[in-house]
Amino acid sequence: MIILHNVSKNFGQFKAVKSVSLSVHNGEIHGIIGASGAGKSTLLRIMNLLEIPEAGDVEINGKTLTKMRGKDLRQARKSIGMIFQHFNLVANKTVYENVAVSLKLARFPRRQRKGRVMECLQFVGLERFQDKYPAQLSGGQKQRVAIARALANNPQVLLCDEPTSSLDPNTTAEILGVLENVNKSLGVTIVIVSHEMDVIRSICNRVTVMADGEVYDTVSIEPKGIHILDNNPKSFVEQLTKDGDVGHA
Amino acid sequence: MPEILVQYEAEIWQSIGETFIMVGVSIIAAILVGLPVGTLLYLCRKGQLYENHFIFSILNLLVNVTRSFPFLLLVVFLLPFTRMVIGTAMGTAAATVPLSIIAIAHYSRLVEQSLLDVPRGVMEAAVSMGASVREIILKFLYVEARSGLVLGLTTSIISFISYSTIMGVVGGGGIGDFAIRYGYQQFKDDLMMYMIIIMVILVQLIQFTGTTVSRMIDKR
Ligand SMILES: Nc1ncnc2c1ncn2[C@@H]1O[C@H](COP(=O)(O)OP(=O)(O)O)[C@@H](O)[C@H]1O
Ligand SMILES: [Mg+2]
């Protein structure tokens, strides 16, 4: 369980997050949606103290992160995975090394490292790409590597900042599928920030709506499921015109 | 081989050796001190991970002041310091002192610039994975910036060679000094030309090696 208690974050005079309280339940996929600039990313980054809040507390599974500094905080971060809009892979490391570095940081036993890396790559379907460099991968593949890297240390929580916002619709669906699988089969709690309603509606159980640095409301929803389009132009047109009232130009 | 080169063979080899010592020590200083200083400049810069106005301002000032000295004046200015460190202000060993200082200032600036090219997101990913400062630097920052660091060092080494040519003023010797004393001052134009050719070949070799290595390790 992630509990934010009255957290605030200012950038100079600007109040990006204003005394927000929020709880994310274990095992759920929790969406955070809102207009650009609403403070979604800042709120997410407060959850692993990438942004240190001026006020308030962050608690994850009983540990109060905001009371931690240095080594303890670094240790706590190892059980909180994070993925980003622009993937943030190390371009000069291979796919394998990108995942392995996360294990090295956590002092994962050296002899079991290779097995664990391959397990994670298999989970995201990239075991054959272990020797490739990020520049040789598509956007969707890069995000899969990032997910594998974030999962390597068996985190309890995965924080996702606009994980599909630089991907095309089909790849978006693929990545959402992977995230859903992470949640269902590994039991990882997921917090996903997005400005796209479709993304949020397809996989989230609960959604927090943010506006101007504040929580407007949190609602429970029934996830609609992920719709994978055929990767052809016809299905794009069908998708665009299926609501009936729009025709061809 | 041209007769004049045969005639001065021993002196030429000696001057090449002196240049290698002066430039070699500069390279070591650049790597051992310039790299960490450049890294600190980067990390402490405004908006970076360990923003620290105080440390940044001091280092920035030191680097700027050192680099704005005309090099010959820096050599003279440092004479007392050199004497303190080496015991004498004359000779090849003494010449390595001002050379190392300019080398540190020169390379640290290029290091800072290469590191600024590393995407901020990569650093954030490192922090989010619980990396310590040391791990961030060694496992992320230097890995991602490595081709720029090599290219910067290449540029720096070539500047060091150029700086080393004037170390004759404190008896540092070297190829440049040899070209001036034997070639220019004794009107042996051909000897001077040969020395210039040696320098050109040396610089070409270094640039070629640097460019090749930097390209090989760049997977971005
Ligand atoms: N490091 C920062 N420095 C200054 N302002 C920032 C910084 N990060 C975010 N902001 C500002 O805070 C507000 C909220 O940002 P963010 O949380 O990224 O919004 P969202 O993710 O909802 O689009 C924006 O107005 C943004 O400009
Ligand atoms: Mg955002």
Image (tube, grey):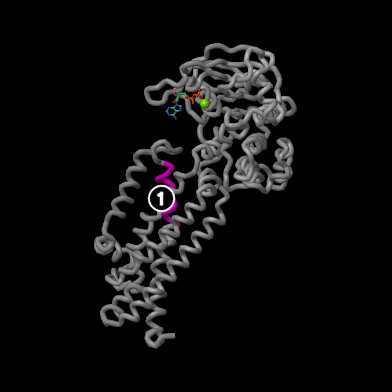
Q: Quadrant of the N terminus of chain B?
A: bottom left
Q: Is residue B139 left or right of residue B106?
A: right
Location of mark 1 (residue): B37
Which residue: 71% across, 40% down? A126
Q: Is residue B23 left or right of residue A161?
A: left
- Residue A150 seen in the figure: yes
Which residue: 53% across, 59% down? B213
Near mark 1 (Cα within 10 A), the count class, few <14, some 14-19 or many ≥20, is many
Residue B36 belongs to the span the image colors magenta: yes
Examine the rendered structure and indicate whether residue A189 appears above or below residue B139: above
**Residue B202: x %, y % from top left:** 44, 70
- Toward the viewer: B79 or A246? A246
- Residue A30 seen in the figure: no
Residue B18 sits in which quadrant?
A: bottom left
Chain part drawn in magenta: B31-43
User: Is label 1 in a helix, a strand or a loop?
Assistant: helix
- Toward the viewer: B187 or A249? A249
| Amino acid found under the numbered disc labelled 1 | Val
